[in-house]
Amino acid sequence: MKIAFIGLGNMGAPMASNLVNAGHDVTVFDLVESAMQALENEGANRAATAEGAAKGAEVVISMLPAGVHVKGLYLGRDGAPGLLDALEAKPLIIDASTISPEDARTVAAAAKKKGLTWLDAPVSGGVGGAKAGTLTFIVGGEAAGFEQAKPVLEAMGKNIFHAGDSGAGQVAKICNNMLLGILMSGTAEALALGVKNGMDPAVLSEIMKQSSGGNWALNVYNPWPGVMEGSAASRDYQGGFLTDLMAKDLGLAWELALGSKSTVPMGSQARNLFALHSAQGNGAIDFSSIQKLYRAGE
Ligand code: NAD
């Protein structure tokens, strides 16, 4: 298939790479030149603009940081028209970014007015899952669009869920990431407590993994440096899932809670922890670096 891929960051680059490896004809666009060069080296074509990448594409996929970027891309910004206005054909559009359900519904409705199907399809599984092609896709939108998207998503992921109508993919993703934020800060807290009381972090991790405290943050994303080979913590928290992106997702959870009169005391606490951690200069490193917050004064 002829696929346009827009946004080649920590997640988008390996996802686009898997599409190339699956034999698709992929044209990429990112604001960062080196990101496009890397994909070109792997066999993708590159375009000078998002519109150029989407020209003639059967499927357009975007993987951008936040709602402001997604709305800017599709609806336009600063008076400039967006991609929805520039499209000559009618490709299936899949946005895999994590944004608010409201933003997703706004763009999907604008697309529908133009006869286009626009799916929200946020992912779970981290950079490791993106590289391995084992991501979970959580899709919101009409069933027909979901069925059309499935074979393309299968080149990048293992579990493909249809969560419901437009925005439902984001609701499910935000619930998941609120839980992840709580689990990562809780894991960091438990490890710091153990180490302060004389435990080896690797020994403590192994014990908790085999006990009732086991969870994804502990089992596959250990936040203590040196405990897990290949983890973000073991490469000085470089790359991965940035603190600022987790803080954004916890903010999205807070907005959802306000709008639905839900109570999220644990999610609020996690949001405050990640916001504080970001304010201390850790926004652009992996979110598991929240461990540092518990090691202050060491
Ligand atoms: P990132 O910051 O590493 O990458 C974003 C990329 O988008 C950058 O390369 C940037 O240059 C590009 N970009 C921004 N605006 C653009 C535009 N207008 N046109 C073209 N390119 C543009 O972010 P990421 O870690 O790849 O995450 C992307 C999305 O996926 C976010 O919404 C994030 O919350 C979500 N997510 C991330 C992870 C993870 O582990 N990193 C996991 C699940 C979901």
Image: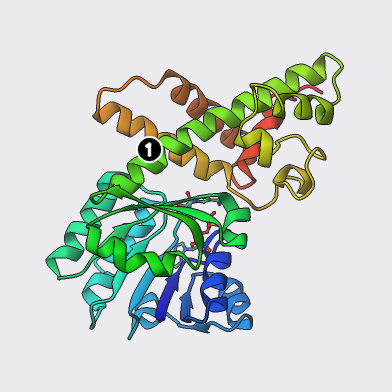
Residue at image mark 1: 252
Q: Residue at x 65, y 38 (%)?
A: 288
Residue occupying image coordinates x 41% and y 76%? 4
Horizontal arrangement in the rendering, residue 49 relative to residue 184 (left or right): left
Image position, residue 112 (x, y; %): 16, 64
Q: What is the crowding at mark 1: few (fewer than 14 residues within 10 Å), some, or many (at least 20)? A: many
The quarter of the picture where residue 120 lies is bottom left
Picture layout, residue 103 above or below residue 292: below
Residue 105, can we see it? yes
State how many labels appear: 1
* Residue 245 x %, y %: 51, 45
Callout 1 secondary element: helix
Question: Which is nearer the eye, 140 or 280?
Answer: 140
Place of residue 205 in the rendered image (x, y in percent of width and height, measured from the top left): 76, 29
At which x and y percent is residue 47? Answer: 45, 83
In the figure, 279 relative to 61: above or below?
above
Taking 258 as reference, is 144 above or below it?
A: below
Q: Residue furthest top?
A: 197
Q: State the quadrant of the N terminus.
A: bottom left
State which quarter of the image contains the C terminus. Answer: top right
Specify whether 279 is left or right of 295: left
Q: How is the image coloured?
A: rainbow
Which residue: 62% across, 61% down? 132
**Left or right of residue 141: residue 185:** right
Image position of 176 (left or right of 222) = left
Residue sticking out furthest to the left:
113
Residue 78 visible, this orientation: no
The quadrant in which residue 41 appears is bottom right
Query: What residue do we see at 80% from left, 37% from top?
Result: 227
Kind of residue indicated by mark 1: Leu
Does mark 1 have its CB less than 8 Å from ligand 1? Answer: no
